[in-house]
Amino acid sequence: MNVLLKKDEFKNTRRSILPGQDGEGSTQVHLDPNIDVGTAKVFAVYGKGGIGKSTTSSNLSAAFSKLGKRVRKIGCDPNHHSTLTLTKRRVATVIDALEEVSFHSEELRPEDFVYEGYNGVMCVEAGGPPAGTGCGGYVVGQTVKLLKEHHLLEDSDVVIFDVLGDVVCGGFASPLQHAERALIVTANDFDSIFAMNRIAAAIGAKSKNYEVRVGGVIANRSKATDEIDRFNDTVGLGRVAHFPDLDVIRRSRLKKSTLFEMEDSPELSAVQDEYLQLAETLWEGGQLFTPTPMKDREIFDFLGFD
């Protein structure tokens, strides 16, 4: 059974969803409603491009593994670099694997698209459709379907989606169909908070029909968090972790390593502890947030951007 369409069929993967099915007036890629991730706790990590989602989600995956959890990380960016620090290399994507077998998914084996990373974290890169011809959300949905067909989610405790966050169309919002918590990574600046506001709106739209809720805001690459906290207080969000712009984090990316593999130091220990605490909090359930995002024009005034 083929779980992905051939290249020339990607352009036909979108369809309209009736009002009330997936957000009022929404036009979404159609995902199989029978696909269920199972009993694993599922998290989707969002944020503007370049904010550090891959670094954050990889270190969070490592932290969950340190707590003894069986972790599967799914990279959902066409750049397919989400699992670089876990696997030490750019791995082949689901799209790459399917192209090798002319999109006959029944010929694939798990080792063709699943790679073991640091401390047993199992890594998958969804990849993307041919540029300009299809929806990334379809690829994400069909990647989950492929994992289910090979029974690769039943033995997971935690599944983490790392998702491109600048685009909040129905396609890139598709991991929210499977997640129970969405985490937003942001810095203490206008562009990051602007993206966070729109991502919160996308999560709110999905939460009308799916169980996903905002699990909190992760401040990243920022010494201060005053603007983040001011925005959170206004719209009803909360910060659950803070990772400053530290040299040890930059060096870990250059070394293609998680923070748990770097040479120990007091600075590093503090960051590791923050990740472990975040993982523990999320595993226990954490807090749920139901924000009221601002209109675009309101956030310009709120942040004082001329």
Image (cartoon, rainbow, N blue to C red):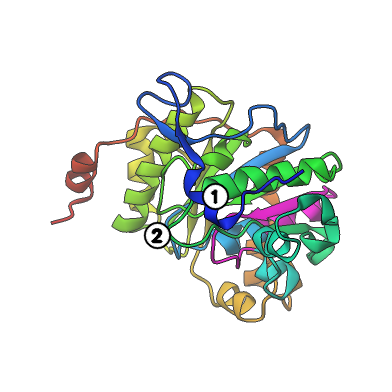
In the rendered image, the residue lying farthest to the left is: 306
Q: Residue at x 79, y 65 (%)?
A: 117
Q: Three-letter amino acid code at disc 2?
A: Ala
Magenta-colored span = 59-82
Taking the spot 43% from the left edge, 63% from the top edge, the residue there is 222
Q: Which residue is mark 2?
A: 224
Residue drawn at (32%, 57%), measured in percent from left and top? 191
Along the line of sight, the residue nearer the viewer: 24 or 67: 24
User: Splitting the image into 4 quarters, where does residue 291 fall?
Assistant: top left
Q: Which residue is mark 1?
A: 9
Q: Secondary structure at mark 1?
A: helix
**Which numbered disc, 2 or 1, marks the residue that appears first in the sequence?**
1
In the rendered image, which quarter contains the N terminus?
top right
- Disc 2 crowd rating (10 Å Cα; few below 14, some 14-19, many 20+) is some
Residue 151 screen position, x and y as percent: 85, 42
Q: Residue 151, relative to residue 85: is it above or below?
A: above
Provide residue 174's location: percent of width, then percent of height.
54, 40
The answer for how far apart the CA atoms under marks 2 and 1 are is: 47 Å
Q: Amino acid at mark 1?
A: Glu
- Relative to 25, residue 220 above or below: below
Q: Position of residue 7 (x, y in %)?
A: 56, 57
- Closer to us: mark 2 or mark 1? 1
